[in-house]
Amino acid sequence: MKSALATSLLVLSAVSSPLLQTPALAGPYPGMAGTEGSDAVALDDAEIVAWATGVSELVRGPVNVSNLTQGYASFGTAANALGPVVSANPDDVYDTVSLGDGGSITLTFDQPIRDGEGWDFAVFENGFSYAGESLAFLELAFVEVSSNGVDFFRFPAVSLTPADTQVGTFEWIDPTDLHNLAGKHIQGWGTPFDLSALAAVAAADPRLDLA
């Protein structure tokens, strides 16, 4: 999981596994990289001008929140979340840090992220597609931003995936059912976030400065 600058603080909070369910019909949101209308950001996109440079907090969650005997996530280190993404190869999984269910990581940047035209930053995860089709194995996270390092504001996120069955190990999710959730796109492709989605929040709360 890495983040690119396009708030000075960004927190990623992993969605607990019970919220990840198997899909039914395609949803209304852009699909995965390589499909028509996808909003996925390539790791070498020319609009990326900087990457996260620091980690102020890493909180690991359980490997499986429904079975705590499996312990807590331990793969990778905080440093794996920093700097540029190095590979789009789904077999190259070592440059990543696992948060576990409900875990979080707070990233910092040398320069504040501003609300400009279009997407302002992207978050990269290490999901992989199912046989080149429109479904993917994805691990999702909420995204929050902060201007002062104390007060964090979450992007409004949507998941239209059915909630009647628990997703199994390495089962598939339809990205067209997801909006404003980090990890929507497969490895090598970032999920874009536009700070204008929080404009109304910033207008009502001076603690959030998007300018």
Image (spheres, helix red, strand yellow):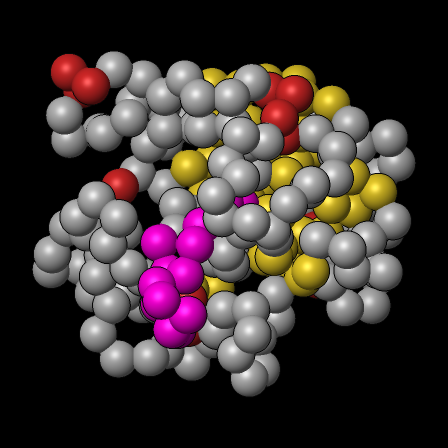
Expressed as whole percent of the image width and height from the top left, the position of residue 10 reads: 65, 36
Left of 4 or right of it: where is 137? left
Residue 99 visible: yes
Q: Residue at x 74, y 45 (%)?
A: 4
**Image height of 84 relative to 66, above or below:** below
Q: Residue at x 23, y 29 (%)?
A: 64
Left of 65 or right of it: where is 125? right
Left of 21 or right of it: where is 56? right
Q: Residue at x 32, y 17 (%)?
A: 72
**How many numbered discs, if any?**
0
Expressed as whole percent of the image width and height from the top left, the position of residue 125 reads: 53, 45
Q: Residue 131: within the magenta?
A: yes
Expressed as whole percent of the image width and height from the top left, the position of residue 170 reads: 26, 48
Residue 36 found in image quarter: bottom right
Region of the chain picked out in magenta, as a range:
125-137
Q: Nearer the viewer, residue 53 or 142?
A: 53
